[in-house]
Image (tube, grey):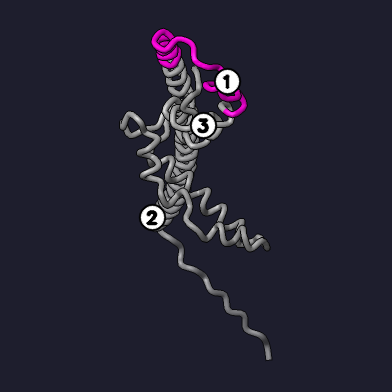
Amino acid sequence: GGSVTLTLTMPALSDAERIARREVQIIAREDARRAKIDAIKVEKARKARERDTEAQALQTKKQIEEGERARRQEVAEKRERSIAAREAARQKDAAHAGERTGRQDKHASKYSKKSVLLLKEVFDEYDGDGYGTISLNEMRQSLIQKKEDKARAALQSKDLAVRQAAAGIDIADVVEPLFRTLDRDGDGEISFPELLAVLFPLATH
């Protein structure tokens, strides 16, 4: 038996069909190109937003840091002005006091410079904002913090006397009457001259 070969012949496309197919291919390529361009644009826009966000974050951080530096500088300048003003007032009061009272017994009226400086260090420790005065809130917070520190130390101590002392009445428990006693002019703040007058009543300026 002989073999039979079948040959399938596709019908020839008409000119109109070839033109239509070519147009479809052109449109498909154009759509793909536009989609690629759109994707590139979207990616560029996303990266631009990220850069803007990062730049804005850096600018915000810089502004915060500059604001904090300005605030610290302002506090320092206010403290210097306050100290200078109080020192000038103190010297003026001292001059007037000297004119009124004349000489006082130097042995009875003077305290050691070391004691006065130590008192000033304690005052500055309580003066949290550095304005040259101590408010009731500043005194309360400082005393409460010291009380808590003492309580923690007592818990770790093996000394019974230390633990018993920590369990007793603390100066933080009477902060308001203590503050009123030290605030001699009743303006709601304690100045160093007020503190000095109470603790070292015979101190000379």
Q: Is residue 91 magenta?
A: yes
Residue at numbered disc 1: 107
| Main SS, magenta residues | helix
Looking at marks 1 and 2 on the same chain, the residue that comes earlier in the sequence is marked by 2
Residue 18: x percent and y percent? 43, 55
Dot in front, 3 or 2 = 3
Which residue is rendered at x = 61% and y = 58% of the image? Answer: 162
Between 2 and 67, the residue placed more toward the observer is 67
Dot in front, 1 or 3 = 1
Tell me whether circle 1 and circle 3 mark residues in contact (CB < 8 Å): no
Q: CA distance from mark 1 to mark 2?
A: 120 Å
Which residue is rendered at x = 60% and y = 62% of the image? Answer: 155
Asked where in the image residue 157 lies, by quadrant, the reply is: bottom right
The numbered disc on residue 124 is 3
| Callout 2 secondary element | helix
Residue type at mark 2 is Ala
| Callout 3 secondary element | helix
Residue 173: x percent and y percent? 42, 52
Q: Count the marks: how many?
A: 3
Image: magenta residue range: 88-115
Residue at numbered disc 2: 20
